[in-house]
Amino acid sequence: MIVIDHLHHVSLAVTDLDRAKSFYSHILCLNEIERPAFDFPGAWYQVGSQQLHLIVYPEASTLRGTDELTSREGHFAFRVKSYEETLKWLKSTGIEIQENYYSKSGFAQLFVSDPDGNLIELNIER
């Protein structure tokens, strides 16, 4: 039997590191952390006790090839402190947002995509 303690990290394929870092650092306001000296480009971010790893890999089969916002595609979710403040911030950046305040999930959701189409949910208890 496997006993999972917690989620350690999520890795995402990206095509352009500078563009991806700008999104994750400046739009999502994540803190970049030191990354080992791998022989391929990427970046790591600390998110609470977990991490987000970006890997430059333009050939990745996980790249969606679209920036269409939908909650039904594979995505990961960040819990935010304030729905209203998050929505206000995202709108100020000009990024496309899908709002779902009255989600059947029981929490308010916002969906965005990074420059490579990776879907991200930002949510909070209603």
Image (tube, rainbow, N blue to C red):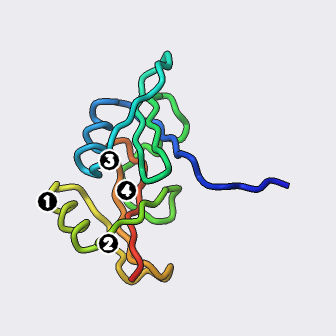
Q: Cα distance, mark 2 to mark 3?
A: 21 Å
What type is the residue that disc 4 sits on?
Glu
N-term mark: 4 or 3: 3
Residue at left offset 28%, top offset 30%: 18
Q: Secondary structure at mark 3?
A: loop
Residue at left offset 48%, top offset 41%: 12
Which is more foreground, mark 2 or mark 3?
A: 3
Left/right of residue 11 with respect to residue 78 in the rendered view: right
Q: Position of residue 51 (x, y in %)?
A: 47, 45
Circles 4, 2 touching at the beta carbon (< 8 Å): no
Where does label 2 land, which residue?
99
* Numbered tag placed on residue 30 in the rendering: 3
Q: Position of residue 59 (x, y in %)?
A: 50, 28
Q: Where is residue 112, by image quadrant?
A: bottom left
Which is more foreground, mark 1 or mark 4?
A: 1
Q: Position of residue 104 (x, y in %)?
A: 49, 83
Circles 1, 3 touching at the beta carbon (< 8 Å): no
What type is the residue that disc 3 sits on?
Leu
Where does label 4 land, which residue?
68
N-term mark: 4 or 2: 4
N-term mark: 1 or 4: 4
N-term mark: 2 or 3: 3
The local crowd at label 1, few if under 14, some if 14 to 19, many if 20 or more residues have their Cα within 10 Å, is few
* Numbered tag placed on residue 20 in the rendering: none
Seen in the picture, residue 81 relative to 59 is either above or below; the reply is: below
Q: Cα distance, mark 2 to mark 1?
A: 15 Å
Q: Position of residue 14 (x, y in %)?
A: 41, 35
> In the image shown, does 120 or 32 lie closer to the viewer?
32
Seen in the picture, residue 32 relative to 4 is either above or below; the reply is: above
N-term mark: 1 or 3: 3
